[in-house]
Amino acid sequence: MTDAGTAFAVDISGARKRFGPIQALDGITLRVPRGQVYGLLGPNGSGKTTLIRAILGLVDGVEGEVTLLGTRMPDREVLARIGYMTQAAALYGDLTAEENVRFFARIHGGGDVEAALRFVELEDRRRAVVATLSGGMRTRLSLACALVHRPEVLLLDEPTVGVDPQLRVQLWNGFRAMAAGGTTIIVSSHVMDEAERCDRLGMIRAGRLLAEGSAADLLGLAGVDRLEDAFLTLAEGLL
Amino acid sequence: MSWRRTMAITARLLSQFRHDHRTLGILFAAPVVILGIFALLLGGGGDLPAMGVVNADAGPLGSAIVRQLEASELVDARIVDAAEAEERLTSGELAAYVALPEDLTASVMQGGALDPAIHLRGTEPSESAATLRAVQAAMVAAAGELAALGGLTVPELAPVVSYRYGGASLDSLDLLGGPFVGLLVFFIVYLVTSVSFLRERSLGTLERLMASPLRRTEIVVGYSLGFSVVALLQAAEILLFSLWILDLYNAGSVLLIFVVEALLVLGAVNLGIFLSTFARSEFQAVQFIPVVISPQILLSGVIVPVSAEPGWLQVVSNVLPLTYAVEALRAIMLEGADLASEVILRDVAVLAGFTVLMIVAAAATLRRRVA
């Protein structure tokens, strides 16, 4: 099966993974259509990061099936078309901003370093060594490294932690623009106001998908006005 | 000063130790292991230096010296013929041999000096010293024995000492310097690589590399090459400093020394990457030094020859890569050994094999998440 025929960027069915006593993934099934912004919502430790890592094929021994761009994971080649921003800004502290972005472009087979730096508004800090950048700048740079090769799927693990509200709005506008251009974005967050910017949401708790749908769907399902309340209601209903 | 606040620090520290079993283990086990190895190395118990005696003396003095040497607790002496002695000295089976000429007794009887020729291999200072002392003691005892019987007056002792390799002018630096260059390179390269690769793990950049099309072997080999460029420059610098500034004795090819060093560097780089898998912090990576590096240095033969270790410890020495590097560097620099030598070929093969093994091990364990 070629991925050209697949409408889903990500297709997970029955994913399970246990780390010692912790059931990090407890039978998650979800599909993300291409070009969507999909939000993974859940408290800390709910399994969001494990799910993202499982999508990338980085978790050993996952039961069930994970397909990324039509390719059964784990698979190294498909990763050239994927961007991944880890939770902590994982960068080389003694390289400059530009050198970091260029490195990640090269290991993915090329990319537009200029455009990536412009996207995160760091073009005037390109020669700054990462160790001298502020926390928010590092987060932005980390994002630039994740999207420099123009990936078809972008996985963002809590990308806006430590980013000020103004830049957060800009980044989300950027994400929306990328999605409009066909990029699939999967973004994890525990900030509920970000959730409303996603096309579709998955609420995760204790490794299980509690509910899935648009923000309006979830509010309707729970019969409440705020996503925060919806999360609490849905979580209780399942426990 | 508040006693309560002070005790809070102390209690916290002790709690941290309780949770860090590895540090505790190293704190209490490493000194015992290292001192134990030291005791085994310096306490003897291994083979005595082998020396040959070529006895052509027609009189009783020669056989008296042979008797004394055979009873010596400093050397393991045996009778050999002249051709055999030469051959075994070159191959390293003998650390020395003493030639007692036909007219030894006769010339001493006529008031001449007791002047046998002592041929030393000259590559192991401790063995040279032991054989010289043994021969000296044997001559004194043998001459005294005959004098007591009234056969002769005690002669002047004037052995003629010659060295197969190097010479009397070699000092400890010449003998230890070459292998030490290798140990130094290995140690520093290991330290820098393991700490630096651990940062790649702990900062999360390795996770990003794993989420890219990079293959594990590409990461490990790319890393090795990068570090090796710097490490080889360092090795070259140390080598040139040793040879030109410290004026270390070298009878062999500088290029061949560099090849051995280069293999050591590649091995150390990949050992560093491999061991970084088992550490959670830079601190823990440094803790591998007393466990992994120090025993290797002690057992490599640089301080005490491997043959002088107790038998089971020789087995340990013989599986450690540094032992082969030390052997090769000694053979090249002191004996002028080249690629025609079987010892060098074997050592180079072992070091190359170790490097390949470490690359495979490093690539295989790369994905392990410690954090």
Image (cartoon, coloured by chain):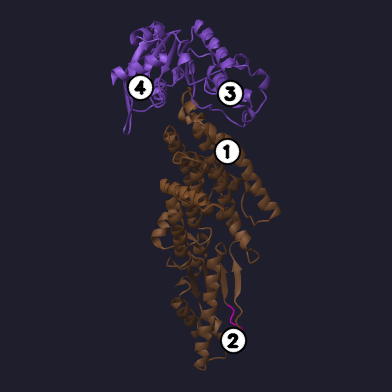
Q: Between residues A124 and B106, which one lies in front from this camera angle?
A: A124
Q: Amino acid at mark 3?
A: Gly
Return the residue at label 4. Answer: A205
Q: Residue A232 location in percent, x, y?
A: 36, 18
Q: Earlier in the sequence, mark 3 or mark 4?
A: 3
Single out the residue that lies furthest toward the right.
B245
Q: Nearer the viewer, mark 4 or mark 2?
A: 4
Residue A81 numbered mark, or none: none
Q: The chain drawn purple is chain what?
A: A
Secondary structure under the numbered disc 3 in the rendered image: helix
Q: Nearer the viewer, mark 1 or mark 4?
A: 4
* Marks 1 and 4, how far apart at CA: 47 Å
Q: Is residue A79 above or below residue B180?
A: above
Return the residue at label 3. Answer: A136
Secondary structure under the numbered disc 4 in the rendered image: strand
Chain B: colour as depicted: brown
Q: Earlier in the sequence, mark 1 or mark 2?
A: 2
Secondary structure under the numbered disc 1 in the rendered image: helix
Same subunit: marks 3 and 4: yes
